[in-house]
Image (tube, grey):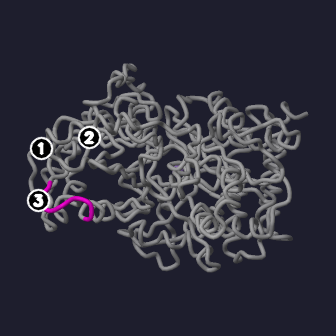
């Protein structure tokens, strides 16, 4: 981290470097490394002094020397109501992942690499940031700080049994006790805690429901009877689980809306409609960025507007990551008024966004450069793309878990000593949670099965400079293999937006990778172009044709199929009516 290397410079030169420090790091806090260095807090931090003092006053009555505050709610949701954002209230941190521990003298906050810089911008000097997110790191810290025989408290409603066990056992071995404090101590001191959400519960229309709730309950009962343990009841606590399995309607929260059965057939047209909105954004930015009129917020707003014009749109699936230059190096940055950056032809730009539609959920990231990228930027982008392609085109036997194959998304980067500090993909719901467990590439995800939707999203982040991520949604499908191995699987990429060619160096890529890329471009032409034509988007149509030209020069196959396709399109009376 540059922040840390700068500390070293400060030690050597003291006063002289102080000026640079404030200039370069005005958006992250400095908490007085030396007596003469003034404490600097960015405007994005929250003063937590009184909140912590109030919480500490309550701890002796419950006989706890430390109190653990996780980021989730009683349903263990990812996106939670403001009323449940206890971690945000006590720390000032607004990201979706992290854990805080408060003792009588210390307040410490753990989060993963996606959020390190955001935490430095939001959390004040009462807090120490630990750049780690593993429970083992928190347990080790507790054992160092809390004497033997003392107790550590948690709200039992905010911990799964697994998480409870991962704290309880190592603490017990070290003679410290994890205890359940049913009354949430943050709630006790949170005087202006907002009321529960009051949005209406929405029932999905019948035309997007494939199976009734009665069918789903019947299916669960069947599984219970077949199970070796013969359970007499199944507990469903997650909001999306209960909404999908039981009542075919869900609680509307800000980002995840309602419920739907698996409607794969409806998903492809959805991805076409979503691609139209993202393509409109890219075309518009290509024209307006050189004029210097647009910034991260206006771009995020534009794509939301374009999505909202598409059929069945219900809202964004998460807050868009619209990030230019160094802001994109923060993998999960979202712009606000303090950090908003003007878009420029001299910087790379990343847009990670998605929509909730009645017939599905989308999540896509594209990284672009409107000027001349450096050789390093081009190589890093190309290697991220190679990783995306290598994983996407993999054929694998049934029973394969995502964690066993995700290395393919990193190989091209590892080869040159580069990497990324986040997961490679997550399950994605169907008009549901945009990060849907248990599908994905993490160690606790289940084996991949046909019909599962997952994101594939390798990246590369160069701190204080730029960030790259290429994210597509892919569905697991049956694969054709030469020797017909039974039930082999592969991915089919369903996101349909061209990758920025300015950043692709095909000299680095294998023939197979380029062929995959060409086939993907053809798929965009055959699936998205008719919809652009239908929606009367001429400029977007020619932009897509230009950005999906075959890479393999003189490739008879690719040229022939693009000609056939163009001819087929030209013969369409609809197209003729719109274009001529
Ligand atoms: Mn994603």
Q: CA distance from mark 1 to mark 2?
A: 40 Å
Name the residue at 39% across, 23% down. 202
Nearest to N terminus: mark 2 or mark 3 = 2
Q: Quadrant of the N terminus?
A: bottom right
Q: Position of residue 533 (x, y in %)?
A: 77, 37
Is 361 placed above or below 23 here? Answer: above
Disc with the residue nearer the chain's start (3 vs 1): 3
User: In this view of the protein, can residue 227 be seen by the observer?
Assistant: yes
Q: Is mark 3 within 8 Å of ligand 1?
A: no
- In this view, the residue in front, 229 or 264, is 229
Question: Quick check: is 149 in the magenta stretch?
Answer: yes
**Range of magenta residues:** 144-150
Observer-nearest of 281 and 311: 281
Residue sitting nearer the eye, 412 or 269: 412
Residue 468 drawn in magenta: no
Nearer to me, 516 or 108:
108
The residues bearing labels 3 and 1 have C-alpha atoms spaced at a distance of: 38 Å
Looking at this rendering, what residue extends furthest in the right direction?
A: 580
Give above or below for 139 relative to 319: below
Disc 2 and disc 3 in contact, CB within 8 angstroms: no
Rendering quarter of residue 451: bottom left
Question: Label 1 neighbourhood size at 10 Å, few (<14), some (14-19), many (20+)?
Answer: few
Which numbered tag is attached to residue 149? 3
Q: Nearer the viewer, mark 1 or mark 2?
A: 2
Q: Which residue has dot 1 on it?
A: 233
The circle drawn on residue 56 is: 2
Instruction: Look at 80% across and 70% down and name the residue there.
Output: 375
Residue at left 74%, top 33%?
534
Q: Residue 521, position in %: x, y?
A: 72, 57
Q: CA distance from mark 2 to mark 3?
A: 19 Å
């Amino acid at each position: 981290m540059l922040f840390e290397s700068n500390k070293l410079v400060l030690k050597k030169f003291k006063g002289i470097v102080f000026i640079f420090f404030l200039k370069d790091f005005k958006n992250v806090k400095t908490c007085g490394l030396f007596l003469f260095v003034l404490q600097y807090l960015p405007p994005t931090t929250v003063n937590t002094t009184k909140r912590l003092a109030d919480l500490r006053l309550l701890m002796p009555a419950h006989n706890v020397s430390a109190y653990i505050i996780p980021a989730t709610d009683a349903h263990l949701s990812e996106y939670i109501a403001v009323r449940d954002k206890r971690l945000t209230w006590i720390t000032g941190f607004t990201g979706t992942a992290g854990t805080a521990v408060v003792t009588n003298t210390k307040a410490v906050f753990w989060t993963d690499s996606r959020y390190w810089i955001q935490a430095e911008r939001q959390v004040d000097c009462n807090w120490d940031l630990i750049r780690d997110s593993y429970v083992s790191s928190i347990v080790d810290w507790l054992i160092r700080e809390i004497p033997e025989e003392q107790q550590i408290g948690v709200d039992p409603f905010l911990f799964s049994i697994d998480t409870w066990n991962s704290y309880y056992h190592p603490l017990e071995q070290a003679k410290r006790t994890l205890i359940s404090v049913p009354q949430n101590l943050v709630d006790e001191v949170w005087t202006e805690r907002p009321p529960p959400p009051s949005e209406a519960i929405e029932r999905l229309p019948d035309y997007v429901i494939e199976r009734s709730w009665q069918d789903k309950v019947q299916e669960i009962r069947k599984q219970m009877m077949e199970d070796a343990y013969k359970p007499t009841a199944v507990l469903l606590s997650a909001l999306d689980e209960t909404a999908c399995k039981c009542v075919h309607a869900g609680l509307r929260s800000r980002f995840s809306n309602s419920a739907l059965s698996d409607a794969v057939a409806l998903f492809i047209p959805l991805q076409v409609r979503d691609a139209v909105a993202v393509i409109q954004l890219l075309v518009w930015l290509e024209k307006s960025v050189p004029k210097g009129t647009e910034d991260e917020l206006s771009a995020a707003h534009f794509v939301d507007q374009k999505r909202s014009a598409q059929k069945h749109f219900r809202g964004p699936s998460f807050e868009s990551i619209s990030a230019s230059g160094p802001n994109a190096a923060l993998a999960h940055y979202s712009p606000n008024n303090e950090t908003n950056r003007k878009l420029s032809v001299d910087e790379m730009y990343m847009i990670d966004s998605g929509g909730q539609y009645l017939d599905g959920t989308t999540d896509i990231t594209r990284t672009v450069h409107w000027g001349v990228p450096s050789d390093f930027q081009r190589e890093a982008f190309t290697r991220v793309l190679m990783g995306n392609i290598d994983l996407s085109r993999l054929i694998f036997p049934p029973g394969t878990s995502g964690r066993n194959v995700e290395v393919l998304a990193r190989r091209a980067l590892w080869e040159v000593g580069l990497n990324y500090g986040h997961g490679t993909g997550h399950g994605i719901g169907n008009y549901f949670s945009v990060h849907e467990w248990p599908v994905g590439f993490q160690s606790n995800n289940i084996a991949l099965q046909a019909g599962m939707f997952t994101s594939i999203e390798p990246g590369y982040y160069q701190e204080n400079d730029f960030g790259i991520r290429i994210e597509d949604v892919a569905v697991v499908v049956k694969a054709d293999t030469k020797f017909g191995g039974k039930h082999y699987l592969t991915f089919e990429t369903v996101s349909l937006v061209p990758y920025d060619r300015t950043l692709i160096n095909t000299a680095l890529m294998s023939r197979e990778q380029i062929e995959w890329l060409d086939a993907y471009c053809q798929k965009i032409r055959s699936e998205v172009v008719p919809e652009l034509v239908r929606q009367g988007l001429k400029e977007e149509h020619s932009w897509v044709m230009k950005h999906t030209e075959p890479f393999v020069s003189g490739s008879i196959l690719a040229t022939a199929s693009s000609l056939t396709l163009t001819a087929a399109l030209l013969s369409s009376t609809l197209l003729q009516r719109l274009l001529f």
